[in-house]
Image: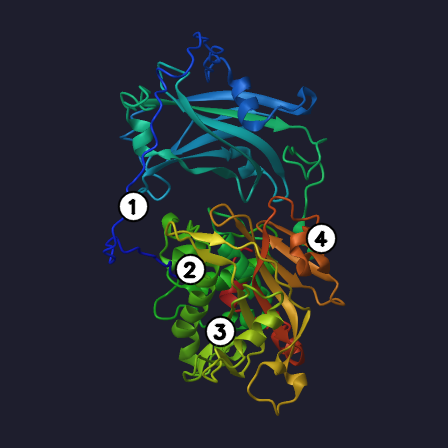
Amino acid sequence: MHGLLLFKNASSTTTQSSPPIYYQPRQSAIHDAPIEPYAPGPPPPPARSVVLHYEDIANQNLGIIKDDDVYDLKCEHWYVSDFHDNPDKVYGPDFKAGGNSWRLVLYPRGKDGLSEHVSIDLQWTSGLYASSYDHIHVQFVICMSTMSFPTNYTCRSTSFRFTKAESEHGFTEFGNFDHLTRNDFDTGREAFVKNNKTRITCIIRILKSTIDTNSRYTGTSADPYNSRAKTGHIGLRRIGKTSYMEAVIQLLFNIRKFRKAIYNIPTGNVDGIITPSDSPALALQRLFYRMQFGTDCPSLAELIQSFGWNDRDINSSGGEECIEFLLAFLRSMDDTYFNKTSPWSETRKLFGNEVAHAGREYFLESMISLDTIGCSSIQESLSKATKRDWAFRKRLRIKALAPVLLFELDIWRQDYYGPTLQKIDHQVSYPLHLNMSLYTETFARDTEWERYVLFGMIMHYGSAKNGNHCTYINGLSGHSEWLKFDGWKVENVPVDEVLNPQQRGSSVRRYKRNNPYVLCYVRESHLNEVLCHITAEDIPTHIRNINA
């Protein structure tokens, strides 16, 4: 979508004489306004010091709670020398808080070593020795201050649930490098990094387990949640802003015929490829195997490394990265692997729709994009797209549909005042069962062939910059129980949360703006084929031998 620029013609084409301009006489604010006596306001609050007033800083940034609810509150200082000469990743000294070990991690040039922002994380070092189900909820503030003036500081605050899989969390963009290392001549503020030295302070608050786990202030839990035991599935360990990748991988993983096709790709020492960092197919096979049989949440690290990506590539926040990654991933797997074994590849068999746009020739398309603005349902959007226009042409012609039908719902608009995207908070309904025979060109075909059931959905909640993605999968147990994949956690949710996300079910509390983004329908007559059973013989031996 492109922005529209409107220009006005500055030159006038009329020659008529204009009436004389009347100027309102200006009144002097100095001579005409009454003189008031000088009344100084209240004195400014005393400056807080990161050394002496860390409790006040915690209350200001994290909120005030009862002392009985606080398990531990600690303040630790890390005096960093040779700031400009340090390597790209520096570990601070270990410290104790709440009976656990912690340390700060500094990235002077960002997590990719090339950023203009300084990154600082808090790492739960005790998590290295914890079980996969242990976790601890903390709130923390990270400050950077001048060595000689502890009242001259900048800070960032957050709360996080640390686990063994996600033992490090913080701020990728803690502060601009120039802002932190240079004096501000407008305000007279001294640089936070002076003489190549600075002070980094961590104020950490650990709360008791008696606090409601659904509230913002949560602490350690005596009954850790076990996704595998409760649902039979496990989530994915998050590394950076990768929720869009996790949502796509979870959706494709649960389409078992696609998973089986990935397992069938020959990766056992083919063309000299023996490491997952060199082969996306091998990395995906190992990831799928861990997701199917593992006990700990795997991460996408191997898969991302096989793409040759760095932190800057994966930490995208543009809004449309989910669709871009899904389509690029399917196209890459098709071109690189599946076309070598069959001209009509598995991805085309599963996702290939034969469609045409605006009178052009038919071609295969993996996803159908729907313009839902002004429509109350996807059926209305499909009717609008397949209706003939003034030139007796259809914007969308559908000749044949795939067994797995992917829809993209339009929830983004280009910001006319900048290069970013804006999210459209527009509610669109979608059915559990969809009859696509009304919108295809082959009317003679049996309508049973074009009956689909909603199998999966990717939802985006939050804003374009600070949003998140989660995946819903139909358990197909009477169409009443669904699985929700959100990072490390997998839980059962009712179908009402899927069909009415704006009403915000019990498992969606963090954001108000819940918008379906990708809908996945499966042809009812192909359910057994698409959701086929995968046996041990379907998995290569070199994949089964890895430590799940």
Q: Which mark is residue 366?
A: 3
Q: Earlier in the sequence, mark 2 or mark 4?
A: 4
Q: Earlier in the sequence, mark 2 or mark 1?
A: 1
The image shows residue 444 at horizontal and vertical percentages of 61, 92
Q: Residues within 10 Å of mark 3 (few under 14, many from 20)?
A: many
Label 3: state its secondary structure. Answer: loop
Amino acid type at circle 1 is Pro
Reading the image, the residue beneath label 1 is 19
Q: Is residue 91 left or right of residue 247?
A: left
Determine the residue positioned at 41% across, 78% down.
339
Q: Earlier in the sequence, mark 3 or mark 1?
A: 1
Q: Which mark is residue 276?
A: 2
Mark 4–mark 1 CB contact (< 8 Å):
no
Q: Earlier in the sequence, mark 2 or mark 3?
A: 2
Determine the residue positioned at 44% across, 7% down.
37
The CA distance from mark 2 to mark 4 is: 31 Å
Q: Earlier in the sequence, mark 4 or mark 1?
A: 1
Mark 2–mark 1 CB contact (< 8 Å):
no
Foreground mark, 2 or 3, reads: 3
Q: Earlier in the sequence, mark 4 or mark 3?
A: 4
Q: Is residue 94 left or right of residue 306?
A: right
Amino acid type at circle 3 is Ser
The CA distance from mark 4 to mark 3 is: 33 Å
